[in-house]
Amino acid sequence: MDTKDIIMTSAVILGPILAVQAQKVIEKLQETRKRRMALFKTLMSTRAERLNRDHVQALNMIDIDFYGRLLPFIKTRYQTRKEQAVTHAWKSYNSHLNQKDEYESLDQWIKKGDEYFTNMLYAITQALNYDYDKVQLQRDCYRPIAHGNVENTQLAILTGLDQVVNKGRPLPMYVVNLPQQDQNGEQDIHNMSMHPTADASAD
């Protein structure tokens, strides 16, 4: 068997195997993009509701969906530049979420958080090859005033509870009204508690 026959035989044998492997790679890439798109849609649709459960779950999936690829032979992770930009932006935003006490006011913390969140969302759009800019991501969002008020109220309540439960802040109490009794009434109660009634003595 000459070289040409060997090549042709190898092609016949390896062709279907390589085709199957190529199909698996394509399917894996499609599944990865599908997951990333679902995450992106969730963050976009809930970006005005940062306390929404789906929003929080999507944030916690970023490290998984943009993890990159594990190279089997050298057992290390490979991330593209765009994937790294996403995970780094999420780390910065996540770190900010745990630094509320370092800001002078809640408004300053929220404003800075908006900046970090927009940077992260922009990194995701770049990884998905969408043509968005940061201004568009930050402003093109419908948020009813009532929803904003509810979210701010919830945040204020949670902040107050954290101060009381975890940081020893005293819980203020105000006495508005006390029941009043005249002096004779108090004396009668005292006497009744100290002396048995006639019925009790008879027994």
Image (tube, grey):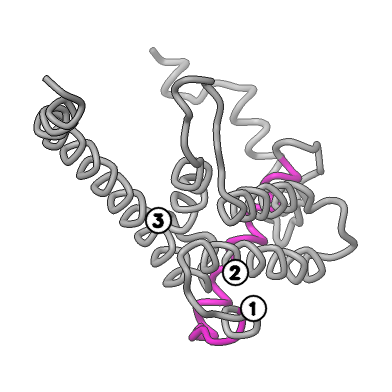
Q: Is residue 162 part of the magenta span, yes or no?
A: yes
Q: Which residue is mark 3?
A: 36
Secondary structure under badge 1? helix
**Mark 2 or mark 3: whose residue is earlier in sequence:** 3
Find residue 6 and report its horizontal and vertical position in percent: 16, 25
Q: Are marks 3 and 1 in contact (CB under 8 Å)?
A: no
Q: Which residue is mark 2?
A: 122
Find residue 83 and report its horizontal and vertical position in percent: 56, 51
Q: What residue is at 55 percent from the left and 67 percent from the top? A: 126
Find residue 116 and report its horizontal and vertical position in percent: 70, 63
Q: Are marks 1 and 2 in contact (CB under 8 Å)?
A: yes
Q: Which residue is mark 1?
A: 134
Find residue 183 and report its horizontal and vertical position in percent: 76, 49
Q: Which residue is at the far top? A: 203
Q: Distance between the Cα atoms at labels 2 and 3?
A: 14 Å
Region in magenta: 138-164
Q: Which residue is at the far front? A: 2
In which image quadrant can residue 107 be found?
A: bottom right
Q: What residue is at 62 percent from the left and 49 percent from the top? A: 84
Q: What residue is at 81 percent from the left and 43 percent from the top? A: 169
Task: Name the quarter where the C terminus is drawn.
Answer: top left
Task: Name the quarter where the N terminus is drawn.
Answer: top left
Amino acid type, mark 3 = Arg
Chief SS of the magenta region: helix
**Mark 3 or mark 1: whose residue is earlier in sequence:** 3
- Judging depth in this view, the residue of 39 and 193 nearest the camera is 39
Q: Distance between the Cα atoms at labels 3 and 1?
A: 19 Å
- Categorize mark 3 by other alpha carbons within 10 Å: few (<14), some (14-19), many (20+): many
